[in-house]
Amino acid sequence: YHASIKATSFEALYGRKCRSVVCWAEVRDAQLTSPELIHEKTEKIVQIKQIIQAARDGQKSYADVRRRPLEFQASDQVMLKVLAHAGDVSYRLELPQQLSRVHSTFHVSNLKKCLSDEPLAIPLDEIHIDDKLHFVEEPMEIMDREVKWLMQSRIPIIKVRWDSRRGPEFTWEREDQF
């Protein structure tokens, strides 16, 4: 039952009350409301409710084991700086200028404590991202050249050292596609 619309979901969707399981038999059946039929339907309803409740209890117990209360203090880092409590389960964050149009209050379920070293943090200005949200890494130098034979064709390849945030990275690239 929804208090705002003063009807059940079924009534709101179909415009009539839902028929009970007792009334699912055909109208022409002579034994529409025999005590045995009603008792049988009631037992099935109880059995279905027990199965649904068992599934619900299993899901709840699994979720409760994994659930842990999260609390943050002002000046904690959750990728952004926590300014203050905004309620029992919400926090106000200090957002960068690029996110000035985003509301600064977030529910605790959207936050995760940041456990990073401050000196190792990379400023966002130095990271380049393309249209498909891939990191753009610049080639530093060509380390080596080779020619690979594939069937009857020659494929010239080069070993490139990339300027990567994770350290030096080397890949073999086709010379004609580089």
Image (spheres, helix red, strand yellow):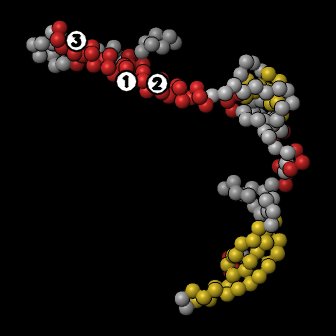
Toward which corner of the image does residue 64 lie, by quadrant?
A: top right
Who's the residue at 67% across and 87% down the image? 147
Residue at the far right in the pictured view = 119
- Tag 3 secondary structure: helix
- Tag 2 secondary structure: helix
Who's the residue at 84% across and 55% down the image? 126
Find residue 39 and name its label: 3
> Label 1 neighbourhood size at 10 Å, few (<14), some (14-19), many (20+)?
few
Say which amino acid is labelled 2.
Arg
For residue 40, say whether it is visible.
yes
- What is the x, y in percent for residue 57? 48, 23
Mark 2 and mark 1 lie on one chain; the one further toward the N terminus is 1
Mark 2 and mark 3 lie on one chain; the one further toward the N terminus is 3
Are the residues tagged 3 and 1 within 8 Å (C-beta)? Answer: no
Who's the residue at 56% across and 29% down the image? 63
Q: How many marks?
A: 3
- What is the x, y in percent for residue 46? 32, 16
CA separation in Å, label 3 and label 1: 19 Å
**Vertical arrangement, residue 101 with respect to residue 145, above or below:** above
Say which amino acid is labelled 1.
Ile
CA separation in Å, label 2 and label 3: 26 Å
Say which amino acid is labelled 3.
His
**Foreground residue, 13 or 55?**
55
Mark 3 and mark 1 lie on one chain; the one further toward the N terminus is 3
- What is the x, y in percent for residue 106? 73, 28
Residue identifier under label 2 = 56
Residue identifier under label 1 = 51
Q: The C terminus appears in which quarter of the rendering?
A: bottom right
For residue 123, say whether it is visible.
no
Task: Give the left or right position of residue 161, taking residue 119 as reference.
Answer: left
- Tag 1 secondary structure: helix
